[in-house]
């Protein structure tokens, strides 16, 4: 997605060779227009796949996922990173290991929001090692539902997440694919959309 | 907001007399169309106030805040509940006490996203004791910016949040104002919009 790559070049900040900071339009401050454009691109790709629900994980996945939901006229569900006193019913859970924080945390979705008849499109802001997406896939499969694909705003193509998800049989659509960035230069591989 | 009150009656669940669960359209599964309608109502109320930025707090505030941002064509910033390795610059922080979880947690916003010239509209999903909104106001004031108002999707009018914010000199606009719910019946006070 050319406009996304241009925005990353313009406003993204590299921290070392592996961390890309995009807090001015995606992960902290959010540019709704870019999110809306992103939503439309994913929707165009998945419009004829019979998707019934969009699933993401709080918090930075919510904005792009919401606009995918709008473009496909579907409900969006965001997985929770912490338990809440109002989550009293049956929940689906998965353990997600964070390589950057080096901790395993539990994520959860209320079971009632995923049915065996659902065909789910997962949306997330970043794909690095694929642990968050893997956790979402596990929960969706616990519910007996089908995962149609994973849509990623920015993939770190030098990490193993894409391979992990593809080995699970889940296709990945990434709008920007970041190569290893040497000498402070942001490099992209060819994107999926 | 009549359509919101009707949706709360239809899909909200009371847990005891003080907890309202709206996880099927706001806090876990999200109805984008309702969020979009909510965004337009807040935007209509604040369109001529010279707002320059929408601020909310992760995670349930993001969806309504994003559509307010769209309706007013403004950037949206969500305050973070936990530190992130990419938050390397100067940050504004506030301590937020949660009465339900009985813990104090720190919320933060990167300082670069709030300028002294900003006029901010705060959006959040719930107002109960007002501690989250108070924390956001404190951070915005640390930046020297002005808070034009707080827009709330569902106010628990039997708790002290609204009074707290009004005593801080900040006007509150709540789209649904929940009265004390006895015998499992949801009661509303007159809403602000």
Image: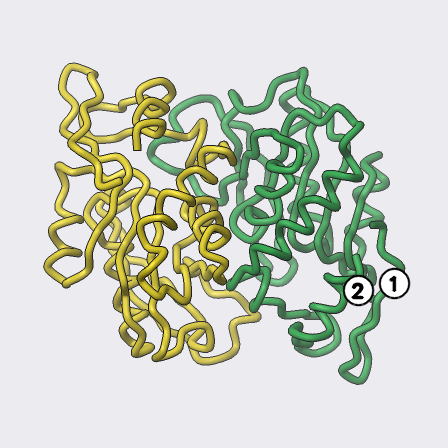
Chain colours: A yellow, B green
Determine whether A29 is above or below A36 in the image: above
Residue under the point 28% across and 71% down: A146
Dot 2 and dot 1 within a common chain: yes
| Quarter location, residue A147 | bottom left
Give the x, y percent position of residue B126: 68, 55
In this rendering, position of residue A169 left or right of residue A108: left
* Residue furthest to the bottom: B183
Residue under the point 68% across and 19% down: B144
Give the x, y percent position of residue B116: 66, 16
Mark 2 and 1 residues: CB-CB less than 8 Å, in contact? yes
Give the x, y percent position of residue A183: 15, 15
* Residue furthest to the front: A48
Disc 2 is attached to a residue of which chain?
A: B
**Secondary structure category for the residue under label 2:** strand
Determine whether A58 is above or below B188 in the image: above
Within-10-Å neighbours for mark 1: few <14, some 14–19, many 20+: some
Disc 1 is attached to a residue of which chain?
A: B
Report the front residue among B189 and A88. Answer: B189
Disc 2 from disc 1: Cα separation = 6 Å
In this rendering, position of residue A80 left or right of residue B191: left
* Quarter of the figure with the N terminus of chain B: bottom right
Earlier sequence position, callout 2 versus callout 1: 2
* Residue furthest to the right: B190
- Mark carried by residue B178: 2
Within-10-Å neighbours for mark 2: few <14, some 14–19, many 20+: many
- Residue at the spot of label 1: B189
Give the x, y percent position of residue B112: 51, 20
| Quarter location, residue A167 | bottom left
- Mark carried by residue B129: none
């Amino acid at each position: 997605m050319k406009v996304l790559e241009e925005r990353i070049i313009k406003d993204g900040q590299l921290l070392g060779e592996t961390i890309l900071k995009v807090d001015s339009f995606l992960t902290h401050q959010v540019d709704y227009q870019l999110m809306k454009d992103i939503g439309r691109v994913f929707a165009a790709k998945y419009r004829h796949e019979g998707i019934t629900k969009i699933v993401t994980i709080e918090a930075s996945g919510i904005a792009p996922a919401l606009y995918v939901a709008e473009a496909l006229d579907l409900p969006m569900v965001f997985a929770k990173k912490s338990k809440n006193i109002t989550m009293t019913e049956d929940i689906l859970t998965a353990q997600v290991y964070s390589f950057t924080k080096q901790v395993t945390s539990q994520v959860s979705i209320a079971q009632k929001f995923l049915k065996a008849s659902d065909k789910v499109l997962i949306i997330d802001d970043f794909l690095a090692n694929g642990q968050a997406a893997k956790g979402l896939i596990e929960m969706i499969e616990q519910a007996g539902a089908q995962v149609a694909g994973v849509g990623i705003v920015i993939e770190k193509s030098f990490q193993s997440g894409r391979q992990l998800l593809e080995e699970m049989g889940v296709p990945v659509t990434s709008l920007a694919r970041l190569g290893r960035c040497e000498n402070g230069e942001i490099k992209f591989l060819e994107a999926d959309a």
